[in-house]
Amino acid sequence: MSPDHRRRRFVGNAALLSAAALTTPRFVRAAGPDETAAPSGTAPFAARAALVPIDARADRIVEINVCTRPFRAAGPRIEIERIAGRTVVHNYGHGGAGWSLSWGSAAIAIGLVRAAPGARIAVIGCGAIGLTSALTAQRAGYRVRIYTRERPPNVRSSGASGVWSPDSRICTLDGATPAFALRWEAMARRSFHIYQNLLGLPGDPVEWRDGYVLSDLPLDRSAPREDGEPPYPSLQADRLRDLDPRSQTLSAAEHPFPVPYVRRYTQMVFNLSAYTRLLVDDFLRAGGEIVTRGFDHPREFRSLPETTVVNATGYGARALFDDESIVPVRGQTARLVPQPAVTYGISYRGHDLSVVPRRDGILVQAQAEGDFGNADTTPDRRASEDAVARLAALFPGVR
Ligand SMILES: Cc1cc2nc3c(=O)[nH]c(=O)nc-3n(C[C@H](O)[C@H](O)[C@H](O)COP(=O)(O)OP(=O)(O)OC[C@H]3O[C@@H](n4cnc5c(N)ncnc54)[C@H](O)[C@@H]3O)c2cc1C
């Protein structure tokens, strides 16, 4: 984006912000005590800009997506196997963390490939894992063809929330063995590093955004879970403390939300439309080819000209390889009309509500009871409308 363009966008946002400040005083955040405590003789530094309220109305829902996270109790399967005369490198089962771990997972998978430099290899799948595996293989010097039943945006990856969530539903407590935790950390760190090199590009495929954890209970207390999901390990908090910016507890004077307990966090967001397009374009520009083809049985790999096959079929691996270790975890997201001036996310604890301020729309996710083990991808519009109504209640007096 050119400096001129950036300046114009800032001016536009500033105008919107001051309009919002006039009409919705609750959302003009007062300065916190430490922000006003400037040394004598020094003007206090300006408080953070007021928050623009989200226009949360059901008639602004422009898209509803349902997809299933490919959850495995033992974590993703990244290993090599001989099938139908082909060397198959599996790379599937990334639960709710596929985008976040994709680059690191691809590095491990492609590291297992033993083909000669310059050889042709096949990647099955064109979601987050297939695309990053294909690009990583190209960068390692292989010529790559992707075979896939669906292409973006019709893959499950396109229905994700699009945030850095490297330990989200990645394994069970038992699955988090010391060996797995080490491998997971290596994947997460490698991915994080690559993502920092995708910041500031045209279309903002990746960016950092603020967000607010809202809670009716003190933030160190959480309500018991009733969603039928197993407890998950907190690998991110335990092992990646040095990567993410620290969150801050806010006093009532420091936020506009009508809830008693609030923390502000800063989080990496993947703008999936722009980011996926970038991955596909980079792959094609480097000589990659995408072939539309579905496989009903692994023995069909025998018909491929490539002798090494990377299996990045995600939830599809359950049927293709008869792998019942993959458990579907249903997730539904709705997108509201984009509001460029809304640059913050929300996670409302105990209310099954999370919001991501993506460029391609304000993403509203509502996790429901019974999603674990549920492979039904029929959209439930009512559930998204209810989530949008819960969101609207956070902006009282805003019409
Ligand atoms: C609601 C929701 C929110 C999420 N939010 C996040 C998030 O914020 N951050 C994050 O990191 N992760 C998130 N995830 C998880 C993430 O979306 C997944 O881990 C990731 O999409 C898995 O990617 P994949 O490439 O393995 O699978 P997919 O996207 O399902 O891709 C599989 C590919 O394989 C192809 N394929 C499958 N079977 C066959 C076959 N038999 N023959 C040929 N081709 C086949 C498909 O057509 C497709 O191209 C979320 C998931 C959900 C459901």
Image (cartoon, grey):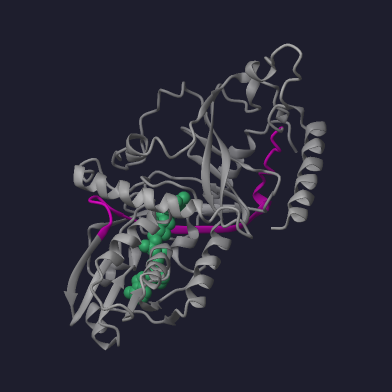
Residue at 43% in and 45% down: 368
As rendered, which of 37 and 279 lies closer to the eye? 37
Asked whether residue 215 is drawn in magenta, I would say no
**Image point 63% across, 17% down: which residue?**
34
For image coordinates 46% across by 47% down, the residue present is 164
Q: Which residues are magenta?
A: 50-77
Above/below status of 31 relative to 206: above
Horizontal and vertical percent position of residue 373: 31, 53
Q: Position of residue 299 (x, y in %)?
A: 22, 81
List x then y, in percent, for residue 272.
Answer: 54, 59
The answer to which image quadrant residue 319 occupies is bottom left
Is residue 386 something one can see in this rendering?
A: no
Pick out the residue farthest to the top. 40
Q: Is residue 56 left or right of residue 267?
A: right
In magenta stretch: residue 66:
yes
Report the front residue among 77 and 122: 122
Residue 343, percent from left and from top: 64, 43
Which quadrant of the figure shows ligand 1? Answer: bottom left
Q: Is residue 55 above or below residue 46?
A: below
